Amino acid sequence: MTDIAFRAFHDRDALALTLAAEVAEALRADIADGGEATLAVSGGSTPKKFFHALSKAELDWESVAITLVDERWVPDTDERSNARLVNEHLLWNEAARARFVPLFTDATSPEGALPDVQQRVADLAGPLTVAVLGMGEDGHTASFFPGGDRLDDAIDPTGKALVMSMRAPAAIEPRITLTLPVLLAAKKLVLHIEGETKKTVLDAALAGEDPRDMPIRAVIQNAPAPLDVVWAP
Ligand SMILES: O=C(O)[C@H](O)[C@@H](O)[C@H](O)[C@H](O)COP(=O)(O)O
C-alpha cells in the first residue's frame, strides 16, 4: 500500500471537530460491540484542538482506556511529558472519566521499563480502537525517528514486541513507543498533520521509498488500507 486517503479541512477548528466526532463514534462502536475501547494519542503541539473537542464528546468514557503512541522519558511533571499534555488537554470535561494508561514508569531508562510497559500494553483490550499519529518535519511518527537506535525493530511489520525504546539525536529525550504492528492493528488509524510544511513533508514521504529515511513511510507502506490523513493549513 502506498496510497493515502487525504482530507484537507478549511481550518484547524473544522479538522478538530470532525476528527473528534469520528474518534468518538469509533469509541462508541467498540464499546457497544465489546464493552470497552482503547485510544492511543500522540504528543506534540498539533493535537491540542482535537483533544479539547474530543474531551467534550458524550460517551461511556468509563469504558475507555487512553494511552499514548509514544512518550518522552520524563516524569509527568515535566513540560516535555506527553502524559502531562494529555492530562492538561484531553482528560477534562466528559473525557476526565476515562482511564489513562501511561507509558512512563519509575525505571531509570525506557530500556529498563520495556517488560513492564509491554505488559501494560498487552493488558489493553485487543487491538486499539483508534490510534492518532502525528508527524515531525523529518518524517518521524510516534518515536520512529530517522537514525533511531531501535528503528528497525520498531518498524518491523512482523515484529512481536508491542513497545520499543528509542534513542535518536532528534528525539531529545530517550523515548518509548508503540511498535508498528500495534499501530497497524488499530481499527481506526489516522495521521493528523497541520500546516504547509507538514504537507510538503508528507509529499516527500510519498515520493520516496526507504522508511528508515522517513519512518512515516513504514506506516503508509504497511497499512492494511490507504492511510487516513487529515490536514489543515
Ligand atoms: O512525542 C512526540 O513528539 C509525538 O508523539 C511525535 O510523534 C509528534 O506527533 C510529532 O513530533 C509531531 O509533533 P508536533 O505536533 O509538535 O509537530
Image (cartoon, rainbow, N blue to C red):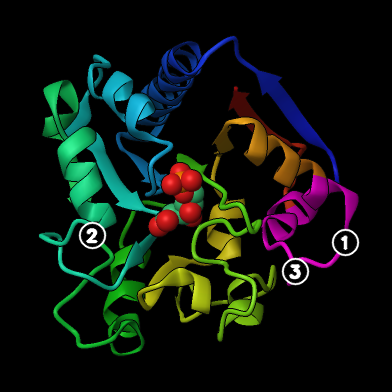
Q: Position of residue 13 (x, y in %)?
A: 43, 14
Give the magenta part as a residue range: 204-222
* Mark 1 residue CB less than 8 A from any atom of ligand 1: no
Q: Quick check: is 215 in the magenta stretch?
A: yes
SS for callout 3: loop
Could you tell me which residue is drawn at 16 percent across and 22 percent down?
94
Residue sitting at x 72%, y 62%: 214
Local SS, label 2: loop
Q: Mark 3 belongs to which amino acid?
A: Asp
Q: Residue furthest front?
A: 197
Give the residue pinned by disc 2. 102
Which amino acid lies under the numbered mark 1 shown in the image of this protein? Glu
Asked which quadrant contains residue 54, the reply is top left
Q: Quadrant of residue 172?
A: bottom left
Kindly report the distance in space between the C-alpha atoms of the residues bearing marks 3 and 2.
29 Å
- Magenta run includes residue 153: no
106 left or right, relative to 31:
left
Percent x, y for residue 194?
55, 31
Depth order, front residue of 129/135: 135
**Is 73 placed left or right of 197 in the picture?**
left
Q: Is residue 214 visible?
A: yes
Please tell me in which quadrant of the rendered image residue 95 appears. Answer: top left
Q: In the displayed structure, does residue 224 sit left or right of residue 32? A: right
Which amino acid, mark 2? Answer: Pro
The C terminus lies in quadrant: top right
Q: Which mark is residue 209?
A: 1
| 44, 26: nearer the viewer | 44
* In the depicted structure, whether residue 41 falls above or below residue 218: above
Q: Is mark 2 within 8 Å of ligand 1?
A: no
Residue assigned mark 3: 213
